[in-house]
Amino acid sequence: MDASQAIAIRNRISGLLVKRARLQAGKSQRECAEYLGCSPFMFGQYERGERGLSLPQLEALAHYFDVPLQSLWDDNYSPPEPQETEDLPIAQLLLLRRKELAVRFRQCRHMADLTQGEVGQILGRSAYIISQYERGARDIPLSELEILVERCGHRLADFLDEETIPLGAAGQERLALSRLNELPPDVREFVLKPTNMLYLRIAMLLSSLKTQSLRQIAEMILDITY
């Protein structure tokens, strides 16, 4: 399967997942288009897979629908029930994320020792379009970003941003569980045991102390034990 076919399939899957999340959230295409700052016609193209959504746009929609970002590109993921979210200056955030991704896109290309023309051949785009991506003048469709990221030996997760466009409640819960699962088994077991709550709170308190205070506490413990 060549890149153009892979991009078309990924755009189609992402479009269907966005449509499903939109309907579950009770949003219209017009509302979503206004939220992203595009036309309803263009948003319809996104949902039909005729045009690829960028990662910042998907991050914004995940916040708007209050679903985990992964649910908008992974067809094996079932999104949770939507919840109300606070309004964000989304136009400014989308622009900021586009600029950030432009830099990351260029860095990824350089690390793979590829020219703009070579990346264009991989993605089925002209070198001019690639240059627009890298200047932040044009949104990078997620399907194309994903292919380049894989080609460069990175993970798409490395390009996500949890601060510029904050995660909704569902995304925050999923992130917390993901981080918990990354802990060593013995540490995870200790953290999850309710009887260890006091020790965890003591550790949290100690982590907030300055080095000098910690040194004094350590000296006091040594005086008591020796």
Image: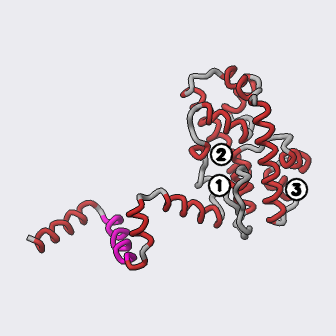
SS type, badge 2: helix
Compute the Cα span from label 1 to label 3. Answer: 21 Å
* Residue 178 appears anywhere in the view: yes
What is the three-letter code of the residue carrying label 3? Gln
Q: Residue at x 32, y 67 (%)?
A: 206
Quadrant location of residue 120? top right
Q: Earlier in the sequence, mark 1 or mark 3?
A: 3
Rendered image: mark on residue 118: none
Residue 43 relative to residue 175: left or right:
right
Highlighted range, magenta? 196-209
Mark 3 = which residue? Answer: 29
Q: Position of residue 86 (x, y in %)?
A: 70, 66
Residue 218 belongs to magenta span: no
Q: Position of residue 122 (x, y in %)?
A: 70, 26
What is the three-letter code of the residue carrying label 1? Ile
Crowding at mark 2 (Cα within 10 Å: few <14, some 14-19, many 20+)? many
Q: Evaluate if marks 1 and 3 touch, with contact meaning CB atoms under 8 Å apart.
A: no
134 or 188, which is in the foreground? 188
Compute the Cα span from label 2 to label 1. Answer: 8 Å
Residue 48 relative to residue 218: left or right:
right
Mark 1 = which residue? Answer: 165
Mark 2 = which residue? Answer: 97
Q: Evaluate if marks 3 and 2 touch, with contact meaning CB atoms under 8 Å apart.
A: no
